Amino acid sequence: MPELPDVSVFKDYFDKTTFKKKIKRVEVFEKRIIKGTSEKELNNVLKGKFFKKSGRYGKHLFAEIDSEAGLDIHFGMTGDLELIDDLSKIPPFTRLLFIFQDGEGLAFEDQRIFGHISLVHNFDDLISRYRLGKDALEITAEEFQETIHKRKGKIKSLLMNQSLISGLGNVYADEILFQAGIHPESKGSRIPEEKIKKLFSTMNKVLKTAIKYAAKREDFPSKFLINHRKKNEDCPDKCGKIDIIKINGRTTYFCGACQELF
């Protein structure tokens, strides 16, 4: 599932492939991919316009059309973007296609159809509409401390709750907790202040490292858990074996030997 670093990469790709391109039309191949709008409305809003700028918030990509309209692009579990120069060769899981005046197109691909594209008024509208918490790379240390410390839920679930902290999913929550040395079943309110400070700094470090490597997980440092997500595999720190549990239905990888339970 695309998480904050992946969407940062999508944003860069979107900027490079769409800016200064006049939109000729939009074609929708799967109606379930558009949320709260229609193909006709999308064309009424987008036809003849340009994408002026973009922004990322959590797992959402915002594309501004003008001062009163923009697109929210959410990638779900399998969403992707691909620029095509031959409109007769559309990728197989294309659900929506932006066609530009220069003859190129930008395909929104989504094999499992868990992503969506919708119209929003502006960036703030996107945030309020989905009741998103602070972006994981914008939240302050003090805000993070308060968010975690006053809640009794399991820390992994708290990190993945988009209304509290926006941008983290299953994989990066596991990674951050592993590197911070905190067991994923720890209760937020029981984690010591110094450990929460470490968790905050680790979150920033992990996300920025992932963005640095363009979210290509195979290129991540060998000490990252992300390429060792197999039961009984050696922990990257060589202190134990990787174990698997379920937390709120999500498969969770951790090392019980080096991640402390609070």
Image (cartoon, rainbow, N blue to C red):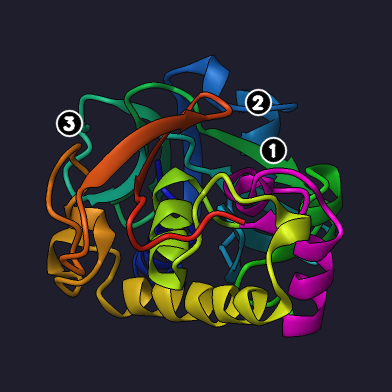
Which of the two residues, 213 or 97, is positioned nearer the viewer here? 213
Amino acid on which the number 2 mark rests in the picture: Lys
- Residues tagged 1 and 3 counted as in contact (Cβ below 8 A): no
Q: Is residue 20 above or below residue 174?
A: below
Q: Is residue 160 magenta?
A: yes
Name the residue tied to disc 2: 40
Q: Quadrant of residue 53?
A: bottom right
Which residue is at a point 38% across and 60% down the rendered structure image?
175
The 10 Å Cα crowd at callout 1, few under 14, some 14 to 19, many 20 or more, is few
Marks 2/1 in contact by CB < 8 Å: the verdict is: yes
Query: Observer-nearest residue: 189 or 53?
Result: 189
Q: Quadrant of residue 65?
A: bottom right
Callout 2 touching callout 3 (CB < 8 Å): no
- Return the disc, 1 or 3, that comes first in the chain's sequence: 1
Q: Which residue is mark 1?
A: 44
Which callout, 2 or 3, points at the residue further toward the start of the chain? 2
Q: 256 or 140: which is nearer to us?
A: 256
Secondary structure under badge 2? helix
Rendering coords of residue 206 (x, y %): 41, 73
Residue drawn at (74%, 43%) of the image: 153
At label 3, the amino acid type is Ser
For the N terminus, the quadrant is top left
Magenta segment boundaries in residue numbering: 141-166
Q: Can residue 138 be seen here?
A: yes
Is residue 47 visible to the viewer in this orientation of the structure? no
Task: Give coordinates of residue 253: x percent, y percent.
Answer: 34, 44
Q: CA distance from mark 1 to mark 3?
A: 24 Å
**Tag 1: residue type?**
Asn
Residue depicted at 44% across the width and 22% down the height: 113
Q: Which residue is mark 3?
A: 88
How far from the left and from the top, in percent, is residue 203?
A: 51, 72
Q: Give how far apart the Cα atoms at labels 2 and 3 are.
A: 22 Å
